[in-house]
Amino acid sequence: MQRLFGMSALSVMLTLAAGAMILSGDRAVGQTNPCASKSVNPGAAKAANPCAPKPAANPCAGKPEVDSKLILRPKATNLAEGNRAQLIKQGQALFNDTKLSTNGMSCMNCHADNANFAASFTTPYPHRMAMAAEKSGVEQVRLDEAIQFCMIVPMQAKPLSWSSRELSALTAYMGELQTAVRKETAGATGSKSANPCAPQAANPCAPKK
Ligand code: HEC
């Protein structure tokens, strides 16, 4: 008798538990799926679809398409002239200047210790710059045009005025840097090879600290 009673009590409990599970299961279907099509109140104003894909926020993506007109120097436009030594000096300062960008970057953030230059950098201009070809369809860039590209995409800023002292200064400085890198690369093919223990360049696409 005891045993029988015990069993029936157990089965009652099991039945209750199963009932509760079904109930809560029913509720879950109706309420927790935010992507389920809503049938309630068809007259209500439509809220934004929470399931729509969000635009990607890659800080290095820049604009998906860059107008090649912004990259290519207009014909008959020349860079500002000036004393080369002074231009180089000013260019070096600008290279470190975060005010040139809208995202807190300076050229130095990506190009410290000559990081992030493709092998093409050491070949004479004009030449192909992969990123410019990809994003703006420009097959060949001059040095000043490569700088304008970096102004627009990685620096997320407006291109510099073609006749500005700033662009001329950056171009002069980058020209010096190109010569230095070229010499370094030429040296590296001899006995001096790249130091495998050198610290890795910072990822230019990592969010700023
Ligand atoms: C967020 C990173 C980033 C910043 C900031 C940046 N650059 Fe670059 N830059 C790159 C990368 C990546 C490349 C290599 C692109 C390629 O070769 O396709 C490059 C390439 C270049 C090149 C060489 C192109 C070539 O191969 O001839 C020059 C010159 C240059 N940058 C100048 C600058 C200057 C000047 C600034 C500042 C106004 C700047 N960059 C800021 C990432 C950056």
Image (cartoon, grey):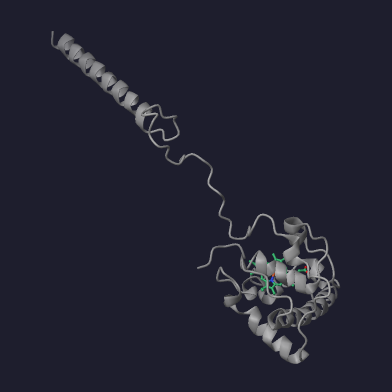
Quarter-of-image position of residue 126:
bottom right
Q: Residue at x 76, y 92 (%)?
A: 83
Q: Residue at x 75, y 91 (%)?
A: 85
Q: Is residue 155 left or right of residue 119?
A: left
Q: Residue at x 74, y 66 (%)?
A: 71
Quarter-of-image position of residue 197:
bottom right
Q: Quadrant of ligand 1?
A: bottom right
Q: Position of residue 125 (x, y in %)?
A: 84, 72
- How many numbered dots are placed on residues in this image? 0
Q: Position of residue 74 (x, y in %)?
A: 79, 70
Q: Position of residue 78 (x, y in %)?
A: 80, 79
Above or below, comparing residue 32 to residue 191 in the picture: above
- Confirm whether residue 148 shows in the render: yes
Quarter-of-image position of residue 161:
bottom right
Above or below, comparing residue 194 to residue 2 in the picture: below
Q: Position of residue 169 (x, y in %)?
A: 72, 83
Pick whichever, 10 or 76, lies toward us: 76
Q: Quadrant of the N terminus?
A: top left
Above or below, comparing residue 91 to residue 7 in the picture: below
Above or below, comparing residue 67 to residue 81 in the picture: above
Pick whichever, 117 or 163, lies toward us: 163
Q: Is residue 208 left or right of residue 138?
A: left
- Confirm whether residue 116 shows in the render: no
Q: Residue at x 60, y 62 (%)?
A: 205
Pick whichever, 159 or 146, lies toward us: 159
Q: Is residue 21 left or right of residue 33?
A: left
